[in-house]
Image: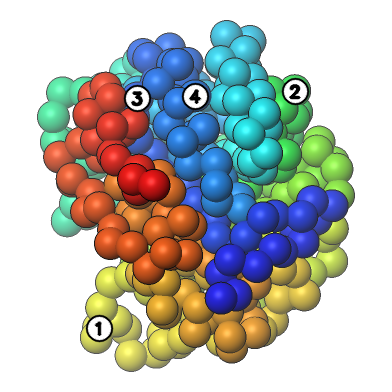
Amino acid sequence: MKLLNEVVLGNQTLKNAIAMAPMTRSRANSEGVVQDLTVLYYTQRVSTGLIITEAINISEQAIGSPYTPGLYNQAQIEAWKKVTQSVHDKGGVIYAQLWHTGRVGHSVDKNGNLPVAPSAIGIQGQQHFTSQGMKDYETPRELTNQEIKQIVKDYGQAAKHAIEAGFDGIELHAAFGYLPNQFLSESANNRTDEYGGSVENRNRFVLEVMQELVNASGSDKVGIKLSPTIYYNNIENNDPESQFKPLIEALNELPLAYIHLMNAMFPLDNYPHYPKNVIETFGRVSNHLVIANAGYTKESGEAELEKGIAKIISFGSPFVSNPDLPERFEQDAELNQPDPATMYGGGEKGYTDYPFLEN
Ligand SMILES: Cc1cc2nc3c(=O)[nH]c(=O)nc-3n(C[C@H](O)[C@H](O)[C@H](O)COP(=O)(O)O)c2cc1C
Protein backbone atom coordinates (compact mmCIF):
# COMPACT_ATOMS: atom_id res chain seq x y z
CA MET A 1 0.00 0.00 0.00
CA LYS A 2 1.49 3.31 -1.13
CA LEU A 3 -0.10 5.11 1.84
CA LEU A 4 2.13 3.11 4.15
CA ASN A 5 5.38 3.62 2.21
CA GLU A 6 8.07 6.05 3.33
CA VAL A 7 8.22 9.44 1.61
CA VAL A 8 11.00 12.01 1.47
CA LEU A 9 9.78 15.48 2.43
CA GLY A 10 12.44 18.19 2.28
CA ASN A 11 15.42 16.78 4.16
CA GLN A 12 13.36 14.33 6.21
CA THR A 13 12.05 10.84 5.57
CA LEU A 14 8.45 10.37 6.67
CA LYS A 15 7.46 6.92 7.90
CA ASN A 16 4.38 6.87 5.69
CA ALA A 17 2.53 8.93 3.07
CA ILE A 18 -0.23 9.91 5.48
CA ALA A 19 -0.48 13.43 6.89
CA MET A 20 -2.73 14.69 9.63
CA ALA A 21 -4.45 17.73 8.12
CA PRO A 22 -4.48 20.94 10.18
CA MET A 23 -7.48 21.11 12.50
CA THR A 24 -8.54 23.88 14.83
CA ARG A 25 -9.74 22.35 18.10
CA SER A 26 -10.08 25.54 20.20
CA ARG A 27 -8.54 24.14 23.33
CA ALA A 28 -5.87 26.73 24.03
CA ASN A 29 -6.42 29.02 27.01
CA SER A 30 -7.76 32.54 26.58
CA GLU A 31 -4.15 33.77 26.13
CA GLY A 32 -3.62 31.48 23.13
CA VAL A 33 -1.34 29.11 25.06
CA VAL A 34 -1.74 25.39 24.35
CA GLN A 35 -2.19 23.13 27.36
CA ASP A 36 -0.80 19.73 28.36
CA LEU A 37 -3.82 17.98 26.80
CA THR A 38 -2.63 19.30 23.44
CA VAL A 39 0.76 17.66 24.01
CA LEU A 40 -1.06 14.38 24.54
CA TYR A 41 -3.39 14.91 21.54
CA TYR A 42 -0.57 15.36 19.02
CA THR A 43 1.62 12.69 20.61
CA GLN A 44 -1.24 10.17 20.30
CA ARG A 45 -1.21 10.80 16.52
CA VAL A 46 2.53 10.33 16.06
CA SER A 47 2.29 7.21 13.88
CA THR A 48 1.35 9.43 10.95
CA GLY A 49 4.16 10.48 8.60
CA LEU A 50 3.49 14.19 9.00
CA ILE A 51 1.48 16.12 11.58
CA ILE A 52 0.36 19.58 10.51
CA THR A 53 -0.91 21.50 13.53
CA GLU A 54 -4.14 23.37 13.88
CA ALA A 55 -3.97 26.91 12.53
CA ILE A 56 -1.88 29.16 14.82
CA ASN A 57 -2.39 32.93 15.02
CA ILE A 58 0.67 34.92 13.97
CA SER A 59 -0.36 38.02 15.95
CA GLU A 60 -3.15 39.32 18.10
CA GLN A 61 -4.62 40.98 15.01
CA ALA A 62 -4.75 37.58 13.30
CA ILE A 63 -7.19 36.05 15.81
CA GLY A 64 -10.60 35.11 14.46
CA SER A 65 -11.98 32.65 16.99
CA PRO A 66 -11.72 32.17 20.74
CA TYR A 67 -9.33 29.64 22.32
CA THR A 68 -7.18 29.33 19.21
CA PRO A 69 -3.43 29.19 19.89
CA GLY A 70 -0.78 31.73 18.98
CA LEU A 71 2.93 31.97 18.23
CA TYR A 72 3.54 35.62 18.99
CA ASN A 73 4.76 35.59 22.60
CA GLN A 74 7.18 33.61 24.74
CA ALA A 75 4.56 31.76 26.80
CA GLN A 76 3.01 30.44 23.58
CA ILE A 77 6.42 29.40 22.22
CA GLU A 78 7.32 27.59 25.45
CA ALA A 79 4.03 25.69 25.41
CA TRP A 80 4.52 24.57 21.78
CA LYS A 81 8.05 23.38 22.71
CA LYS A 82 6.44 20.70 24.89
CA VAL A 83 4.38 19.52 21.90
CA THR A 84 7.31 19.34 19.45
CA GLN A 85 9.60 17.73 22.03
CA SER A 86 7.09 15.00 22.79
CA VAL A 87 6.32 14.35 19.10
CA HIS A 88 10.05 14.20 18.29
CA ASP A 89 10.75 11.88 21.21
CA LYS A 90 8.32 9.44 19.59
CA GLY A 91 9.91 9.83 16.12
CA GLY A 92 7.29 12.15 14.58
CA VAL A 93 7.54 15.10 12.21
CA ILE A 94 5.42 18.19 12.91
CA TYR A 95 4.80 21.39 10.92
CA ALA A 96 3.10 24.49 12.32
CA GLN A 97 0.27 25.98 10.29
CA LEU A 98 0.37 29.79 10.40
CA TRP A 99 -2.89 31.74 10.40
CA HIS A 100 -4.22 35.21 9.88
CA THR A 101 -8.00 35.13 9.65
CA GLY A 102 -8.49 38.57 8.05
CA ARG A 103 -12.22 39.23 7.75
CA VAL A 104 -13.21 35.82 9.17
CA GLY A 105 -13.48 37.09 12.74
CA HIS A 106 -15.54 39.36 14.93
CA SER A 107 -14.81 42.41 17.07
CA VAL A 108 -16.23 40.72 20.18
CA ASP A 109 -13.16 38.48 20.23
CA LYS A 110 -10.74 41.19 19.03
CA ASN A 111 -10.91 43.66 21.96
CA GLY A 112 -13.57 45.60 20.07
CA ASN A 113 -11.39 46.05 16.95
CA LEU A 114 -12.96 45.34 13.58
CA PRO A 115 -11.45 42.51 11.56
CA VAL A 116 -9.06 43.67 8.82
CA ALA A 117 -9.09 42.60 5.17
CA PRO A 118 -7.77 43.52 1.70
CA SER A 119 -11.02 45.43 1.12
CA ALA A 120 -14.01 46.59 3.18
CA ILE A 121 -16.24 43.75 1.97
CA GLY A 122 -18.04 41.74 4.63
CA ILE A 123 -19.09 38.09 4.45
CA GLN A 124 -22.81 37.74 3.69
CA GLY A 125 -25.12 34.80 4.28
CA GLN A 126 -23.00 33.18 7.00
CA GLN A 127 -22.49 33.74 10.69
CA HIS A 128 -19.36 33.54 12.82
CA PHE A 129 -18.79 31.45 15.95
CA THR A 130 -17.76 33.83 18.77
CA SER A 131 -17.37 33.63 22.53
CA GLN A 132 -20.83 35.28 22.67
CA GLY A 133 -22.54 32.84 20.31
CA MET A 134 -23.16 33.03 16.57
CA LYS A 135 -22.98 36.55 15.10
CA ASP A 136 -23.41 38.16 11.68
CA TYR A 137 -20.16 39.23 10.06
CA GLU A 138 -19.17 42.90 10.24
CA THR A 139 -17.74 44.94 7.39
CA PRO A 140 -13.97 44.63 7.87
CA ARG A 141 -11.55 47.55 7.87
CA GLU A 142 -9.46 47.82 4.70
CA LEU A 143 -5.74 47.38 5.38
CA THR A 144 -3.34 50.14 4.37
CA ASN A 145 -0.42 49.27 2.14
CA GLN A 146 1.94 49.76 5.10
CA GLU A 147 -0.14 47.48 7.33
CA ILE A 148 0.04 44.75 4.68
CA LYS A 149 3.83 44.96 4.70
CA GLN A 150 3.76 44.70 8.50
CA ILE A 151 1.62 41.54 8.29
CA VAL A 152 4.18 39.99 5.93
CA LYS A 153 6.81 40.67 8.62
CA ASP A 154 4.51 39.25 11.31
CA TYR A 155 4.39 35.98 9.36
CA GLY A 156 8.21 35.93 9.27
CA GLN A 157 8.41 36.57 13.00
CA ALA A 158 5.92 33.79 13.72
CA ALA A 159 7.95 31.44 11.50
CA LYS A 160 11.08 32.24 13.52
CA HIS A 161 9.10 31.52 16.67
CA ALA A 162 7.92 28.23 15.18
CA ILE A 163 11.50 27.18 14.51
CA GLU A 164 12.47 28.27 18.03
CA ALA A 165 9.58 26.15 19.33
CA GLY A 166 11.08 23.12 17.57
CA PHE A 167 8.75 22.68 14.60
CA ASP A 168 10.20 20.87 11.58
CA GLY A 169 8.56 23.30 9.19
CA ILE A 170 5.79 25.80 8.52
CA GLU A 171 2.59 25.69 6.47
CA LEU A 172 0.93 28.90 5.32
CA HIS A 173 -2.84 28.65 5.63
CA ALA A 174 -3.83 30.23 2.31
CA ALA A 175 -7.06 28.23 1.96
CA PHE A 176 -10.72 28.30 3.06
CA GLY A 177 -11.24 32.04 2.93
CA TYR A 178 -8.68 33.31 5.45
CA LEU A 179 -6.54 36.39 4.84
CA PRO A 180 -4.17 35.07 2.13
CA ASN A 181 -7.14 33.51 0.31
CA GLN A 182 -8.98 36.86 0.56
CA PHE A 183 -6.14 38.54 -1.34
CA LEU A 184 -6.42 35.87 -4.08
CA SER A 185 -10.11 36.42 -4.77
CA GLU A 186 -11.94 39.15 -6.71
CA SER A 187 -14.91 38.78 -4.35
CA ALA A 188 -12.83 39.87 -1.34
CA ASN A 189 -10.15 42.04 -2.95
CA ASN A 190 -10.97 45.12 -5.01
CA ARG A 191 -7.79 47.02 -4.17
CA THR A 192 -6.24 49.30 -6.71
CA ASP A 193 -2.68 49.32 -5.31
CA GLU A 194 0.03 46.71 -5.92
CA TYR A 195 -2.05 44.08 -4.02
CA GLY A 196 -5.13 44.11 -6.26
CA GLY A 197 -6.57 44.70 -9.69
CA SER A 198 -4.74 41.99 -11.65
CA VAL A 199 -3.85 38.31 -11.29
CA GLU A 200 -0.26 39.25 -10.54
CA ASN A 201 -1.23 41.84 -7.93
CA ARG A 202 -3.71 39.54 -6.19
CA ASN A 203 -0.98 36.87 -5.97
CA ARG A 204 1.59 39.31 -4.59
CA PHE A 205 0.68 39.05 -0.88
CA VAL A 206 0.90 35.24 -0.79
CA LEU A 207 4.21 35.24 -2.66
CA GLU A 208 5.70 37.90 -0.39
CA VAL A 209 4.61 35.94 2.68
CA MET A 210 6.05 32.70 1.28
CA GLN A 211 9.38 34.41 0.56
CA GLU A 212 9.38 35.79 4.11
CA LEU A 213 8.66 32.34 5.56
CA VAL A 214 11.51 30.82 3.55
CA ASN A 215 13.84 33.61 4.70
CA ALA A 216 12.83 32.96 8.30
CA SER A 217 12.99 29.19 8.36
CA GLY A 218 15.21 28.03 5.49
CA SER A 219 14.84 25.92 2.36
CA ASP A 220 12.61 22.84 2.14
CA LYS A 221 10.75 23.66 5.34
CA VAL A 222 7.81 25.67 4.08
CA GLY A 223 4.53 24.47 2.61
CA ILE A 224 1.29 26.16 1.60
CA LYS A 225 -2.35 25.07 1.73
CA LEU A 226 -4.58 26.22 -1.15
CA SER A 227 -8.24 25.65 -1.95
CA PRO A 228 -8.70 26.97 -5.51
CA THR A 229 -12.32 25.82 -5.84
CA ILE A 230 -13.75 26.32 -2.34
CA TYR A 231 -16.23 29.20 -2.18
CA TYR A 232 -16.93 29.04 1.56
CA ASN A 233 -16.50 32.39 3.37
CA ASN A 234 -17.65 34.21 0.19
CA ILE A 235 -14.49 33.43 -1.78
CA GLU A 236 -15.13 33.47 -5.51
CA ASN A 237 -12.86 33.63 -8.51
CA ASN A 238 -13.90 34.65 -12.00
CA ASP A 239 -11.51 32.01 -13.27
CA PRO A 240 -9.68 29.91 -10.66
CA GLU A 241 -7.27 28.52 -13.25
CA SER A 242 -6.06 31.93 -14.39
CA GLN A 243 -5.52 32.98 -10.75
CA PHE A 244 -4.00 29.85 -9.23
CA LYS A 245 -1.89 28.44 -12.05
CA PRO A 246 0.38 31.51 -12.19
CA LEU A 247 0.54 31.43 -8.39
CA ILE A 248 1.65 27.81 -8.38
CA GLU A 249 4.16 28.53 -11.17
CA ALA A 250 5.62 31.37 -9.11
CA LEU A 251 5.78 29.08 -6.06
CA ASN A 252 7.86 26.70 -8.19
CA GLU A 253 10.63 29.31 -8.03
CA LEU A 254 10.83 29.08 -4.22
CA PRO A 255 12.61 26.24 -2.33
CA LEU A 256 9.47 24.82 -0.72
CA ALA A 257 8.73 21.50 0.98
CA TYR A 258 5.26 21.02 -0.53
CA ILE A 259 1.99 22.39 -1.75
CA HIS A 260 -1.16 21.10 -0.06
CA LEU A 261 -4.23 21.17 -2.29
CA MET A 262 -7.82 20.86 -1.12
CA ASN A 263 -10.51 19.33 -3.32
CA ALA A 264 -13.76 21.25 -3.73
CA MET A 265 -15.59 19.86 -0.63
CA PHE A 266 -18.82 21.68 -1.60
CA PRO A 267 -21.03 21.11 -4.69
CA LEU A 268 -19.94 23.10 -7.75
CA ASP A 269 -23.34 23.14 -9.51
CA ASN A 270 -23.42 26.95 -9.44
CA TYR A 271 -19.80 27.18 -10.57
CA PRO A 272 -19.74 25.41 -13.94
CA HIS A 273 -16.54 27.26 -14.90
CA TYR A 274 -14.60 25.80 -11.93
CA PRO A 275 -12.28 22.88 -12.73
CA LYS A 276 -13.65 19.57 -11.45
CA ASN A 277 -10.38 17.87 -10.54
CA VAL A 278 -8.16 20.07 -8.38
CA ILE A 279 -5.26 17.65 -8.11
CA GLU A 280 -5.06 17.10 -11.87
CA THR A 281 -5.64 20.74 -12.79
CA PHE A 282 -3.37 22.40 -10.26
CA GLY A 283 -1.16 19.61 -8.90
CA ARG A 284 0.35 18.98 -12.32
CA VAL A 285 1.54 22.60 -12.46
CA SER A 286 3.61 22.22 -9.30
CA ASN A 287 7.24 21.10 -9.24
CA HIS A 288 6.96 20.64 -5.49
CA LEU A 289 5.71 17.60 -3.64
CA VAL A 290 1.90 17.66 -3.67
CA ILE A 291 -0.22 16.75 -0.66
CA ALA A 292 -3.82 15.99 -1.62
CA ASN A 293 -6.63 16.70 0.82
CA ALA A 294 -10.32 16.56 1.44
CA GLY A 295 -12.75 13.72 1.41
CA TYR A 296 -10.30 10.84 1.08
CA THR A 297 -10.77 7.33 2.41
CA LYS A 298 -8.07 4.69 2.54
CA GLU A 299 -9.20 3.43 -0.88
CA SER A 300 -9.58 6.77 -2.64
CA GLY A 301 -6.36 8.04 -1.05
CA GLU A 302 -4.51 5.02 -2.34
CA ALA A 303 -6.03 5.52 -5.80
CA GLU A 304 -4.93 9.18 -5.74
CA LEU A 305 -1.35 8.17 -4.93
CA GLU A 306 -1.45 5.60 -7.75
CA LYS A 307 -2.17 8.43 -10.20
CA GLY A 308 1.26 9.79 -9.30
CA ILE A 309 0.55 13.52 -8.92
CA ALA A 310 0.15 13.58 -5.14
CA LYS A 311 2.82 11.92 -3.00
CA ILE A 312 1.05 12.33 0.36
CA ILE A 313 -2.63 12.25 1.33
CA SER A 314 -3.79 14.30 4.30
CA PHE A 315 -6.76 13.29 6.41
CA GLY A 316 -8.69 15.67 8.65
CA SER A 317 -11.79 14.39 10.39
CA PRO A 318 -10.62 10.73 10.33
CA PHE A 319 -7.74 11.85 12.58
CA VAL A 320 -10.11 13.54 15.03
CA SER A 321 -11.49 10.18 16.09
CA ASN A 322 -8.70 7.76 15.09
CA PRO A 323 -5.38 8.59 16.72
CA ASP A 324 -3.93 5.41 15.18
CA LEU A 325 -5.28 5.94 11.64
CA PRO A 326 -2.20 4.45 9.86
CA GLU A 327 -2.45 1.23 11.92
CA ARG A 328 -6.17 1.04 11.16
CA PHE A 329 -5.44 1.38 7.43
CA GLU A 330 -2.79 -1.30 7.70
CA GLN A 331 -5.07 -3.73 9.49
CA ASP A 332 -8.18 -2.81 7.51
CA ALA A 333 -9.78 -2.03 10.85
CA GLU A 334 -13.00 -0.11 11.39
CA LEU A 335 -12.79 3.61 12.03
CA ASN A 336 -14.25 5.44 15.03
CA GLN A 337 -16.70 8.14 13.94
CA PRO A 338 -15.98 11.73 15.06
CA ASP A 339 -18.47 13.51 17.32
CA PRO A 340 -19.24 16.96 15.82
CA ALA A 341 -20.31 18.31 19.24
CA THR A 342 -16.77 18.09 20.64
CA MET A 343 -14.81 19.29 17.58
CA TYR A 344 -14.28 22.82 18.90
CA GLY A 345 -13.62 23.72 22.50
CA GLY A 346 -13.92 21.73 25.72
CA GLY A 347 -11.50 19.34 27.35
CA GLU A 348 -10.42 15.77 26.82
CA LYS A 349 -13.86 14.54 25.70
CA GLY A 350 -13.75 14.15 21.95
CA TYR A 351 -10.09 15.24 21.98
CA THR A 352 -7.81 12.74 23.66
CA ASP A 353 -10.26 9.98 24.61
CA TYR A 354 -10.92 8.28 21.25
CA PRO A 355 -9.91 4.64 21.60
CA PHE A 356 -6.86 3.06 19.97
CA LEU A 357 -7.08 -0.38 18.39
CA GLU A 358 -6.70 -3.14 20.91
CA ASN A 359 -3.70 -5.34 20.15
C1 LIG B 1 -12.53 20.25 13.33
C2 LIG B 1 -11.85 20.77 12.08
C3 LIG B 1 -11.02 21.88 12.16
C4 LIG B 1 -10.33 22.34 11.02
N1 LIG B 1 -9.44 23.37 11.15
C5 LIG B 1 -8.60 23.68 10.12
C6 LIG B 1 -7.49 24.55 10.29
O1 LIG B 1 -7.22 25.06 11.40
N2 LIG B 1 -6.71 24.79 9.22
C7 LIG B 1 -6.95 24.23 8.00
O2 LIG B 1 -6.21 24.47 7.05
N3 LIG B 1 -7.99 23.39 7.82
C8 LIG B 1 -8.79 23.08 8.84
N4 LIG B 1 -9.77 22.13 8.68
C9 LIG B 1 -9.90 21.46 7.39
C10 LIG B 1 -9.06 20.19 7.34
O3 LIG B 1 -7.67 20.49 7.41
C11 LIG B 1 -9.30 19.45 6.03
O4 LIG B 1 -8.93 20.28 4.98
C12 LIG B 1 -10.77 19.04 5.88
O5 LIG B 1 -11.27 18.47 7.07
C13 LIG B 1 -10.96 18.05 4.73
O6 LIG B 1 -10.25 16.86 4.99
P1 LIG B 1 -11.03 15.53 5.45
O7 LIG B 1 -12.09 15.28 4.40
O8 LIG B 1 -10.00 14.45 5.49
O9 LIG B 1 -11.63 15.83 6.79
C14 LIG B 1 -10.51 21.69 9.78
C15 LIG B 1 -11.35 20.59 9.71
C16 LIG B 1 -12.00 20.11 10.82
C17 LIG B 1 -12.87 18.87 10.72
Residue 27 badge: 3
Q: Secondary structure at mark 1?
A: loop
The first of marks 3 and 4 along the sequence is 3
Numbered disc in front, either 4 or 1: 4
Q: Secondary structure at mark 4?
A: helix
Label 4, label 2: how far apart the Cα atoms are: 17 Å
Dot 2: within a 10 Å radius of its alpha carbon, few (fewer than 14), some, or many (20 or more) residues?
A: some
**What x and y, as percent, mark residue 24?**
39, 39
**Pointer 2 residue:** 164
**Amino acid beneath label 3:** Arg
Q: Is residue 241 above or below residue 75?
A: below
Q: Is residue 173 visible?
A: no
**Amino acid beneath label 4:** Val
Label 2, label 3: how far apart the Cα atoms are: 22 Å
Residue lying at 57% horizontally and 9% vertically, measured from the top left: 75
Q: Is residue 301 above or below residue 58?
A: below
- Determine the image quadrant of residue 87: top right
Please say if the residues under marks 1 and 2 sit with CB atoms less than 8 Å apart. no
**Pointer 1 residue:** 270
**What x and y, as percent, mark residue 157?**
72, 27
Dot 3: within a 10 Å radius of its alpha carbon, few (fewer than 14), some, or many (20 or more) residues?
A: many
The first of marks 4 and 2 along the sequence is 4
Residue 39 badge: 4
Numbered disc in front, either 1 or 3: 3
Q: Which of the pair 56/245 is nearer the observer?
A: 56
The first of marks 1 and 2 along the sequence is 2
The first of marks 1 and 3 along the sequence is 3
Q: Is residue 305 visible?
A: yes
